[in-house]
Amino acid sequence: MNAAVSDAQWEAARGCLRNTGSRFADLIAATDPRAMATADWTVADTAAHVLSIGTMNVWLTRRDGTPSPISAVTDRLGETNVDRVADLNVVALAENPERDTEVLAERLRSDIDEVLRATEDMDPATPVSWLGGARVPLAGLLAHHANEMAVHGLDIARAVNTPWTIPSQDSARFFELFVIGMSRNGVGRLLETPKPPKDRRVTAEFRSEHITAVTLVVDGDRVSVEPPGQRPDLLMTFEPTALVLMLFGRIGKVRAMASGKVRVGGRRPWLLPEFMRTVRFPS
């Protein structure tokens, strides 16, 4: 049975998507589209990438059988795992040649409005088929969209030296609704690796003042969720934004841990690299 999403969580996820989308749209519209946001992407490229996520979510949340407007992308969802996300991004950028950031900002706002309208009366725990056949709860889909804008907004803000904040509660929502929600529903082939996984069970309990404590279990190439408090191999105590930025490669593991915002304990903390070879994110 899918874990319920509370009314408070649902409203918070919707508000986060709306507010982060508005901030991100304002940022890209006011920034030189030719500035390099990352080593490979300009601000305009980054905005186009984020827009592709919004366009995909509009299609995923429609219930009228409308064909995908970006079928070259959505046709590849089932075969795309974490290690192939970069290839999917290349296809998505080619599908959307628009690089006028004011136009992209307006389209981004429009897609968010459409997703919020389409999902207003839906059960937020409804699983949506996602990359690699993973099953993401609807609330997690919205939290992922908001997190993409938060992280890529930081990329742009750092590049042009302008302020950008990612509130802890927003990152906590991404962790609980998307990461844990997907792990409860099934990760499909999303975390498959080229090498056979080790035949070892590793448990990691996550604790933060911003979330309900939870344990993620890696067993071979399978990921599941258990209640906390069972003497985990890894005990992760964290500030949510620092953890999310570490997972997406925006800050290094050493820096995150040296800051005290991500701490690792437990019975066998040396298993952290093995755990993260499975529970990994594109960076």
Image (cartoon, rainbow, N blue to C red):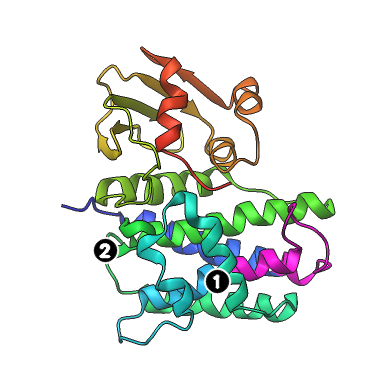
Q: Is residue 7 one of those drawn in magenta? A: no
Residue topped by disc 1: 52
Identify which residue is drawn at 60% across, 59% down: 149
Question: Please, is residue 283 above or below residue 117 in the view?
Answer: above
For the record, the magenta segment spans 26-51
- x then y, percent, for residue 273: 47, 25
The quarter of the picture where residue 99 lies is bottom right
Identify which residue is drawn at 57% across, 40% down: 241
- x then y, percent, for residue 33: 80, 69
Label 2: few (<14), some (14–19) or many (≥20) C-alpha neighbours in 10 Å? some
Of the residues shown, which amino acid type is indicated by label 2? Thr
As rendered, which of 100 and 2 lies closer to the eye?
100
Residue topped by disc 2: 126
Identify which residue is drawn at 65% across, 36% down: 251
Foreground tag (1 vs 2): 1
As rendered, which of 148 and 212 lies closer to the eye?
148
Q: Is residue 27 one of those drawn in magenta? A: yes
